[in-house]
Amino acid sequence: MNKKYTLRHYLFNQGLFYSLGLLMLLIVDYINLYIPQYIGDVMDGLTSFSYGLQDVIHTLFVMLIFVGIITLGRVFWRVFIFGASRQVEKQMRNDLFEKLLTLSQTYFNYHKTGDLMSHFTNDIDAIHYAIGPAVISCFDAIVMTTMVLYKMIVYVNLRLTLLCLIPMAAIGIGGYFFGNEIENSFSAKQEAFSKLSDFVQESISGQRVIKAFVQEKNQDREFSIVNKYNLKKNMDVVKLMASVMPLLEFVIGISYAITIFYGGYLAITAQITLGRFVAFNQYLAMLVWPMIAFGDAIISFSQGRASMKRLQEVFDEIPHIEDSANVKDIRTLHGNITFNNVSFQYGKEFEDSLKDVSFQIEQGETFAILGKTGAGKSTLVSVLARLYDIDRGSILFDGYFIKDIPLKTLRESIAYVPQDSYLFSDSISNNVRFGKLSASQKEIEEACKMACVHDNIVDFPDQYETIVGERGVTLSGGQKQRCAIARALLKDAPILVLDDSLSAVDTDTEDQLLDNLKKIRNGKTTILIAHRVSTIRNANHILVLEEGKMAEYGTFEELMAKNGIFKEMYDKQQLEKQLQGEEPWKE
């Protein structure tokens, strides 16, 4: 367990504020004790005619001072304790987000978005209540109960106090039972909420597909099932919580009955005064809040403990991809890349996605990777950027083994445009600037011109300030791809990887974009992954993958001369163009 992320660590960092808050709470509780005693003394004084008007006024004045101190104390303990719990909540969210940023791609392959989102909302909220209101409730219950019992024993009667405490012993036993039950039920409730969140997130993200396949009713039915399951788990928690308070009130009611019966007897037989009998009833009333607070604390601590266990699983997750112990002080890369017998599989249950792949790319080359769907093209560039670590073989950059290069240096040296051209729900300008946060508007526009998307952008009413919507939904597929390419071009990295990033672009635009790349990428390495031969026909070298293996490798002319897979793909695509009435490519 990483001690940095334990609840004890977070509370320790806010220890001063918690200490001040609990001190204020202690003062408030201590002063509260004297109010029933003053009332009892006044009553005894009035019934015995030993109190005059001056004595009553003096007692009233002292009580008003006490009330003023109690009011200020309550303000301060709320500020200190609630403020500290909010600081812990904020820091915990920051740490959780930072932790997720360090985790490898493999982690996100097996953990759904809805589940991760529920950690930031429900789980951290539950922890906030456990370390804020529940701390106050628990401390108040323990301190107030102890002080009140002391006053009940010393000021009133020991035997009466012990008899009233007998029913309350059941609270400790019940608290242990309910605490475990609530923790288990709340953990199941959080899991159900995660499934519900994930279903909603996927349904909203995939609403175009749902509408295209007319699956609205089916999705509604599926949502009802998930929602019903969520309701059931919530009701399990509600039922447990609903039983806690009535049981506490039942126990308190028994204590009141004992007080009235036996306390009344003591008052009648003059073993205690009427004023002390009244004071005892007020002390017993003061125990009602601590008992309720104790029940509330049981619920909140149990829920907080269940949520902290869920968060701890994330905090304890070890990133699969990180700097090795032998990492070297390498600040820049030039773009010389070597693959030596590289093999990789996504998991033991899968076959190798790459099998003994070997090739070399010289700085400044345009290197193309071609192959059918599932051939391993995207996997190859994923291991190139160390999104995954290879199983066998070696990858070298400028002669350095990939694990000897700092991750920061490696990824800063690669501008990667994946198949899924992800855009944030922000302006076009900010989406492109993501490649270089310090870029000026002029640099952004120049990158968009090179990506052949500038003319489209200026036709929008808000031009570069156009909000693209979630995942760039307001743009066409080709516009999204070109905005993503502009973002990568703005980065101006030594290595540019375009993973089938021209698939939604027409051939004329593609030709113009490739010409622009040739101009601005002079002396820099460019890797093109494509299905269309037209995209890669001017590459220096072409690698053809088939089922993760190197099927063919060479220049365009060499591959055409081999009359193999590449030639077959070329001829097939030429024929398709002719059938569509388009001009065939010139060799």
Image: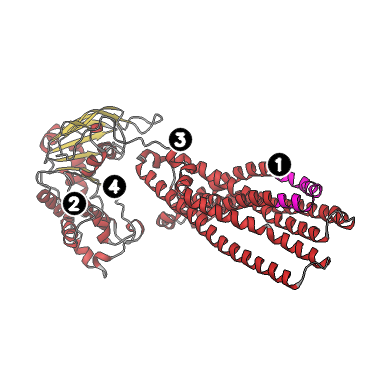
Tag on residue 173?
Answer: 1
Q: What residue did someone put label 2 on?
A: 489
Residue at point 79%, 52% (across, down): 255
User: Which amino acid, by three-letter code, is at mark 4?
Assistant: Gln
Label 2 vs label 3, nearer the camera: 3
- In space, the residues marked 2 and 4 are separated at their CA atoms by 16 Å
Give the image location of residue 210, x and y in percent: 44, 55
How far apart in space, not on screen, are marks 4 and 1 (Cα)? Answer: 59 Å
- Occupied quadrant, residue 276: bottom right
Q: Assess disc 1: are there few (<14), some (14-19) or many (≥20) residues with their C-alpha within 10 Å of its C-alpha.
A: few
Disc 2 to disc 1, C-alpha distance: 67 Å
Residue 296 screen position, x and y as percent: 63, 52
Q: Position of residue 352 (x, y in %)?
A: 33, 30
Q: Secondary structure at mark 3?
A: loop
The front one of 418 and 435 is 435
Q: Residue at x 62, y 66 (%)?
A: 65
Q: Which residues are magenta?
A: 148-173
- Badge 3 is on which residue? 1
**Which mark is drawn over residue 78?**
none
Name the residue beneath numbered marker 4: 419
For the residues bearing labels 3 and 4, Cβ distance under 8 angstroms: no
